[in-house]
Amino acid sequence: MSDCVFCKIVKWETPSQRVYEDDQYIAFLDINPINPGHTLVIPRDHYENVLDVPEEVLAGMIKIAKKVAPAVVGAMKADGFNIGINNGRASGQLVDHVHIHIIPRHENDNLKSWPSRSRYADGEMGATAKKIKDAIK
Ligand code: AMP
Ligand code: ZN
């Protein structure tokens, strides 16, 4: 897509610091890292999110993340990492070209992986599981 910033990165119309690339995928540094070394994995082809991307392309993205993540951790001397994919504005997705975040994590980096958790009311957990089960196609 012509106005997509990650498509522009693919075409070298926007500069990037690439750490890995092959004929289908690119991994490059996030310009506003949560921690230094924060890396994004994208397919060269434009798909909006996890629901749009073909299963085999998504599987390939995971494969690249599994290859790149230990390098990010090693090079950044990190203690762990988060991987995540935002889908839709409500989740925080800003760039509509599917991407995996690889975020190196350090003991005591004072980041929270997730906000604080809630609790289900009595009976609500079973009802919620049923709703989801019934919605699976
Ligand atoms: P998301 O919020 O999951 O859509 O993440 C989009 C990410 O893309 C953000 O973390 C941005 O910092 C990053 N980003 C946006 N533009 C660029 C760019 N030109 N080069 C590298 N990373 C970018
Ligand atoms: Zn794109």
Image: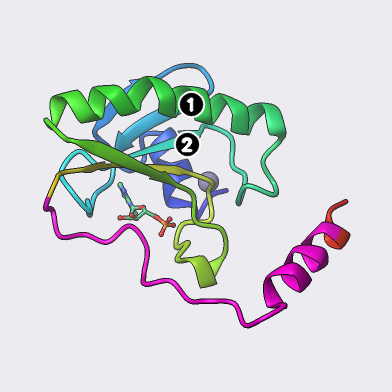
* Side of 11 relative to 97 (left or right): left
For the stretch drawn in magenta, the main secondary structure is loop
Residue at the spot 22% in from the left edge and 51% down from the top edge: 33
Residue 73 visible in this rendered orientation of the protein: yes
Closer to the camera in the image, 47 or 100:
100
Q: What residue would you read off at disc 2?
A: 42
Q: Is mark 2 within 8 Å of ligand 2?
A: yes
Residue at the spot 63% in from the left edge and 47% down from the top edge: 50
- Which amino acid type is shown beneath numbered disc 2? Ile
Question: Residue 120 lies in magenta, yes or no?
Answer: yes
Quarter of image, res 45: top right
Q: Residues within 10 Å of mark 2 (few under 14, many from 20)?
A: many
Q: Secondary structure at mark 1?
A: strand
Query: Which badge, 2 or 1, comes first in the chain's sequence?
Result: 1
**Which region shows up in magenta?**
108-133
Q: Determine whether 118 is above or below 134 in the image.
A: below
Q: Which mark is residue 25?
A: 1
Residue at the spot 37% in from the left edge and 63% down from the top edge: 114
Residue at the spot 54% in from the left edge and 46% down from the top edge: 98
Residue 15 visible in this rendered orientation of the protein: no
**Mark 2 touching mark 1, by CB under 8 A?**
yes
* Side of 122 relative to 2 (left or right): right
Q: Residue furthest front?
A: 122
Relative image position of residue 93 (x, y in whole percent): 48, 61
Q: Residues within 10 Å of mark 1 (few under 14, many from 20)?
A: some
Relative image position of residue 119 (x, y in whole percent): 52, 76
Question: Residue 25 lies in magenta, yes or no?
Answer: no
